[in-house]
Image: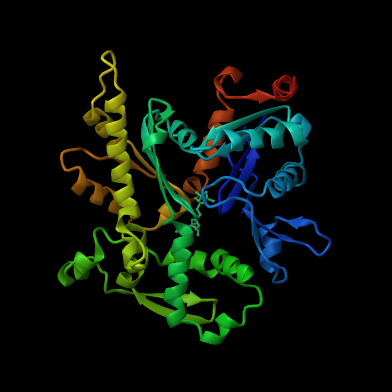
Amino acid sequence: MSIVIHNGTHTTIAGFSQVDMPQLLCSSSYTKRPDGSLDFDTDEILNGPETPIFTIMSTDGTPYDWEALEKQWKWIVETKLGAKLEETPLVVTVAPDITKETKNQYLELALGRLKVPVFQMVLEPLAVSLSLGRNTALVVDIGAAKTTVTPVIEGTILSSAAIRSRFAGDFLDFQVYETLKKRAFPEEEESSSACPSFTAWHNSHTWIQEFKAYMLQASPSKLQEMDSATADILGLNVVKNFLYKKHKTVTLTQKDCCSITEGIFQPSTASSQFSNEEGLSNIVAKAVKKAGASTAQSASAANVTSAEQIHTALLTNIIITGSSSLIAGLEQRVVNDLSYQFPQYKLSSFANPLVLDRKLQSWHGGVTMANLPSWDLGDWVSRKDFQSSADDEQY
Ligand code: ATP
């Protein structure tokens, strides 16, 4: 029995590997209590006093506050799961481009400071793809601080072709806020915030979250190129109502809702400072092309994998994951855009149709790796191995 923890930039998910559902789903942020202790409980933070919000993970998905991470893991394992760190194998999901230094910091935290008996770091996109039964896939993960596109070829991450962008959930939070600011709330509310980090976090976890789930949608093609007849047929002029903070109804057309999401695909529609090169479908296409080019380059005479074969393998195995991918129409839009860029290829995508399963996909990936039929198959490091390698380094 192991414990699996997924630390996203937005959400932390944790639970035992032999149970289907995780025991804990909470924010990856925390506050400080007056006595100096850290509060990781999302409900307590939501209902507590306005106080600064701190984060543990940097926007690229690596921890930058290791002390807070240590306390969070202790809270998760001991308080929430009722287990003992020194007795329970631990598996955590990590970013695919993790550096050697960050790896060592994870090892030091888990095996050195927290003294877990065995520890494994699993590369998130690889775990997601294997947990869905594919050893070749293009994993498109649209999370909070980042979108990452990672080609996985025969069980190996092709890091030279992986691409990341900042156009994801947090970016949408800002766009939703800016859109609703004009329509829903008076200026004074904005300036009355005593603690901006708390207000932004609170908004993101309450009404912005609801707005994203119920209102946002993606148009099937570039919004500004759509003629009015098509927009009419697609129902984009239909109005939708949103109850802002349970007291004010805000009315938007479906087109308004699509134009918020459009920023993910064409960032320049949100601000001229952003480049469309970093748009979602563009980075997916770029990753496919890079993967084709890099494997064709490295192919030896004995192993002639052509760029076309790689393109075909990836484009028929597109996995769309991350909670921001739950926006209605988003998967279809990615496929539509890609079919323009790769007209000669057949495309096939998979996105978990169940909302909760999609939200838990990365954690389930970690569970799959924790439950491999033999210990040898996983990348486990024991406390003993860690201590003896640390001793070796001293001499
Ligand atoms: P990252 O992948 O950046 O490390 P994470 O794994 O913590 O972050 P996810 O849990 O995949 O991130 O996604 C969180 C984001 O998804 C948040 O911005 C949240 O508002 C957004 N989100 C959650 N549910 C929905 C939904 N139904 N529709 C649209 N967006 C959603």
Q: Is residue 9 above or below residue 298?
A: below
In this rendering, does residue 114 appear at all?
no
Residue 247 to residue 392: above or below: below
Q: For this rendering, which residue is in front, 177 or 288? A: 288
Q: Position of residue 126 (x, y in %)?
A: 46, 33
- Could you say which quadrant of the image residue 76 lies in? top right
Residue visible at 66% across and 77% down? Answer: 194
Q: Is residue 210 above or below residue 333?
A: below
Q: What x and y, as percent, mark residue 75?
A: 74, 47
In what quadrant of the picture does the N terminus appear?
top right
60 displayed left or right of 52: left
- The residue drawn where x is 31% and y is 31% is 294
| Residue 33 spot, x, y in % from top left | 78, 62
Q: Quadrant of residue 51?
A: bottom right
Q: Is residue 41 above or below residue 207?
A: above
Q: For residue 32, say whether it is visible.
A: yes
